[in-house]
Image (cartoon, rainbow, N blue to C red):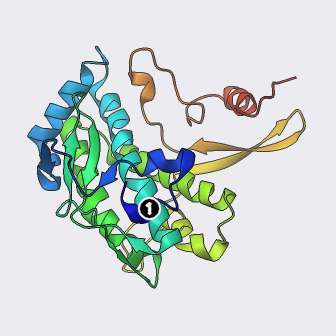
């Protein structure tokens, strides 16, 4: 973990920052730009597919992308919002350690970053969006002939969760405002569409102890295309009854 992240990512949260470091620890790396080349992505997915024989290639890529987003997004988004700290994670900056299963195991940054005070959400997150997420998603979508919407939804789902966790931990609204904008603003100031816009919705349903606000993704992540996997508990394709059952189970309740 990069030292500046330690106060924010301590205890059970440490795992969400351990994927960023300043050293490869003698492990082989590929440059960020090499990482998103078609040949390299295909190699990663071929290794990853060994654990999922018979899997739909698009579903495989979607699940694989979640591991990448889980390395990048929690530390970058949370440190920017709470610490006012910019981490250099554009593909031109980073190197990637790839493990034996074809997964990105660690991103190696060139330096620990710097303090920033951006005026708006776009200024704060443009390097992340344009320098990392866009080229990664566009390249992976081309390789497996997958709609980029699926991958943007995966990323947005994590962003929404990160902002929600920070709110639950008591960080004030003004601290999280740019994080909220990252998923609530339909277009950026220069007119470019925000592809992270509203990745989830909250559905109100009757529960045994009163109305419930139930989180539901807007875009299916295709997880059910993997052998042995079913739709997620917040999948938009499952019935309202099943969505409610899953939500109640997570709360330790049951349908009467």
Task: Please indicate, yes or no, whether residue 253 appears anywhere in the rendered image.
Answer: yes
Vertical placement of residue 177 versus 242, above or below: below
Res 184 quadrant in image: bottom right
Residue 204: percent from left, percent from top = 76, 45
Vertical placement of residue 168 versus 214, above or below: below
Residue 9: percent from left, percent from top = 50, 55
Residue 24: percent from left, percent from top = 20, 49
Nearer-the-camera pick, 177 or 191: 177
Nearer-the-camera pick, 181 or 108: 108
Task: Please indicate, yes or no, whether residue 195 appears anywhere in the rendered image.
Answer: no
- Extreme right residue here? 209
* Residue at x 84% of width, y 38% of height: 206
Residue 140: percent from left, percent from top = 23, 43
- For the image shown, how many numbered marks are present on the structure? 1
Q: For mark 1, what is the residue?
A: 5
Res 56 quadrant in image: top left
Q: Residues within 10 Å of mark 1 (few under 14, many from 20)?
A: many
Residue 130 falls left or right of residue 30: right
- Label 1 element class: helix
* Residue at x 30% of width, y 69% of height: 127
Residue 183 falls left or right of residue 137: right
* Residue at x 20% of width, y 26% of height: 47
Nearer-the-camera pick, 239 or 222: 222
Vertical placement of residue 11 versus 59, above or below: below
Res 190 quadrant in image: bottom left
Q: Quadrant of the C terminus?
A: top right
């Amino acid at each position: 973990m990069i030292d500046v992240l330690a106060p924010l990512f301590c205890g059970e949260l440490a795992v969400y920052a351990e994927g960023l470091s300043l050293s490869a620890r003698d492990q082989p790396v590929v440059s960020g730009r090499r990482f998103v080349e078609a040949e390299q992505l295909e190699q990663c997915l071929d290794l990853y597919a060994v654990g999922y024989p018979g899997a739909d290639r698009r579903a495989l890529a979607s699940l694989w992308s979640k591991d990448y987003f889980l390395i990048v997004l929690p530390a970058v988004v949370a440190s920017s919002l709470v610490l006012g700290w910019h981490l250099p994670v554009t593909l031109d900056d980073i190197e990637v350690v790839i493990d034996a299963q074809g997964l990105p195991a660690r991103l190696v940054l060139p330096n620990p970053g710097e303090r920033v005070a951006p005026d708006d959400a776009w200024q704060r997150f443009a390097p992340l969006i344009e320098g990392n997420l866009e080229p990664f998603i566009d390249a992976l979508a081309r390789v497996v002939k997958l709609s980029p919407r699926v991958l943007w939804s995966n990323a947005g789902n994590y962003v929404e969760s990160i902002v929600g966790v920070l709110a639950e931990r008591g960080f004030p609204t003004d601290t999280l405002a740019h994080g909220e904008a990252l998923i609530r603003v339909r277009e950026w100031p220069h007119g470019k569409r925000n592809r992270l816009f509203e990745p989830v919705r909250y559905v109100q349903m009757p529960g045994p102890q009163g109305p419930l606000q139930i989180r539901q993704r807007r875009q299916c992540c295709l997880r059910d295309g993997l052998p042995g996997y079913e739709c997620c508990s917040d999948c938009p394709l499952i019935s309202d009854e099943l969505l409610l059952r899953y939500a109640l189970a997570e709360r330790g309740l049951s349908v009467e």
